[in-house]
Amino acid sequence: MSIQGMTRRQFVGTASLGAVAAMASRTVPAYGNLGGNAGKLALQGGRPVRSKPWPTWPVWDRSAEDSVLAVLRSGNWYRGQGKTVTQFEEAYAKLLGAKRCVCMVNGTNSLLTAMHALDVGVGDEVIVSPYTFIATYNVVLNSSALPVFADTDPETFQINPDTIEERITERTRAIMPVHILGIPANMDRIMAIAKKHNLVVIEDACQAWMAQWRGKSCGAIGDLGCFSFQNSKHLPCGEGGAVVGNDDALMDRVHSFHNCGRPFGSVPRTSGYPIIGTNRRMTEYQAAILLNQIQRLEADTARRWENGQYLTSQIKNIPGIIPCRLYEGTTRAVFHLYPFRYKKEHFNNAPRSKFMAALSAEGIPCSGGYGPQYRDGLIEAALTSKNFTRSFPKARLDQYRKELNYPGNEQLCEEAVWIGQNMLLTEKADMDDIANAIRKVHDNRDKLA
Ligand SMILES: Cc1ncc(COP(=O)(O)O)c(C=O)c1O
């Protein structure tokens, strides 16, 4: 499979191995950081800039094995019998400065739970970012609500706040900003628009553990925030998720709903099940892994942030390479993926796929990221479904189809290049390898076409 054709997860999973492992036995190149005339491109048989492998992910040690075994041996494998899930919820809420946290089976179901708890569903419209993992689309569609995409700002990779208000209709109930790639969306603007139009805000922080906006944790700013703990994530346990929030009554409903609608806190105690519910409970094993993983999150996060900023300083002057711009309110980005944009006019008009192949051959695995998924067929399948044709007037759905056009997003889908988070868990010299490889490809641009 081409690197461009890889999903984000496949990319994150292979970034540390793949091309790099294949080169591990070759000698370290002499290509320096001066940007002078490069050696031959590795793609054409030259020596790669880097032959050292990148760190693998996830990382664990003996203490994690002990924690999981302790749960196993206790026989208390479900949260109703053990205390591990509750312990993790308390630790994660504290880390984020949020009042409450409820763990879930995964990020997708955390988002579905948040929508349900805020009563966003059938016949409603939700403003979402088109530049995101498909789960963000799916949770809105699965709730029989219309995902109304605001455009993407290609400079910041985030939802463009200037394009939100024009998409609000009388059916709009929520904004779902995604802090995509672990980079904060413009929460000042989003919260102000939500307030003005009386909308709820559900933060998709599934890639943004410990990212901060003006000192506040992403995910703890809107009405509810959702996280993923899937294997590739910075706080991983295989599959897992969480909803965080600061409103006790709302979080009581989140808890009750995820536990079959059983009473919890202010959800009234009746003979059995006072509200509609489902089962999205996390197991004690998952929480045992998370309690172990959370110990490394702060140090890893600080390192990714430091290395990400250093990398930006090293590549920003390479012609045709545009690092992601951070909004002024960003206190910390966590770079689940480190992104930049590729301008082919500065690379002898070589397509991005050729650039990425050349960079990967230099020992720097990379990917092209998301495509314009709203054209993949899932939206049309939803719009023609029974749920949607019953819940929305035909005129609204026809109008919606006409508006599925996002120039900023289309541009970004063509220009983006991502580098995996594991590659930022290294030293400055490793960031120099990335910058040197990009510079080498640029110096050899006449050989790329
Ligand atoms: C932005 C975004 N939203 C939602 C999800 C869904 O999370 P999960 O895979 O845990 O269901 C993910 C996971 O990759 C994500 O990246």
Image (tube, rainbow, N blue to C red):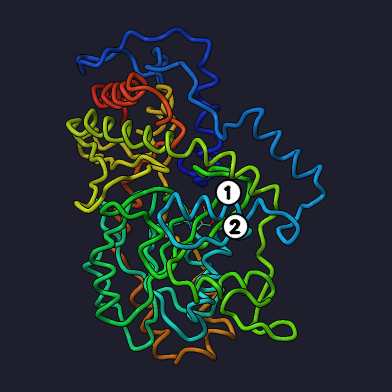
Work out whether 74 lies above or below 246.
above
Q: Please name the amino acid that badge 2 sits on.
A: Asn
* Ligand 1 within 8 Å of the CB at mark 2: yes
Q: Earlier in the sequence, mark 1 or mark 2?
A: 2
Front residue (pair 284, 30): 284
Work out whether 200 lies above or below 52.
below
Q: Whole-percent x and y of residue 305?
A: 33, 37
Q: Can you see residue 222?
A: yes
Q: Can you see residue 135?
A: no
Badge 2 element: loop
* Ligand 1 within 8 Å of the CB at mark 1: yes
CB atoms of marks 1 and 2 within 8 Å: yes
How far apart, in angstroms, are the residues tagged by discs 1 and 2? 7 Å
Work out whether 91 lies above or below 263.
above
Q: Whole-percent x and y of residue 137?
A: 48, 66
Q: Residue at point 43% right, 34% down?
A: 300
Quadrant location, the N terminus: top right
Tell me the quarter of the picture where residue 13 sits. Answer: top right
Badge 1 element: loop
Front residue (pair 158, 318): 158
Q: Whole-percent x and y of residue 349?
A: 25, 37
Tell me the quarter of the picture where residue 311 sits. Answer: top left
Q: Please name the amino acid that badge 1 sits on.
A: Gln
- Disc 2: CA contacts within 10 A as few (<14), some (14-19) or many (>=20): many
Work out whether 64 lies above or below 49.
below
Q: Residue at point 44% right, 67% down?
A: 224
Q: Could you say which disc has been placed on residue 106 in the image?
A: 2
Residue topped by disc 1: 230
- Disc 1: CA contacts within 10 A as few (<14), some (14-19) or many (>=20): many
Q: Residue at point 66% right, 48% down?
A: 286
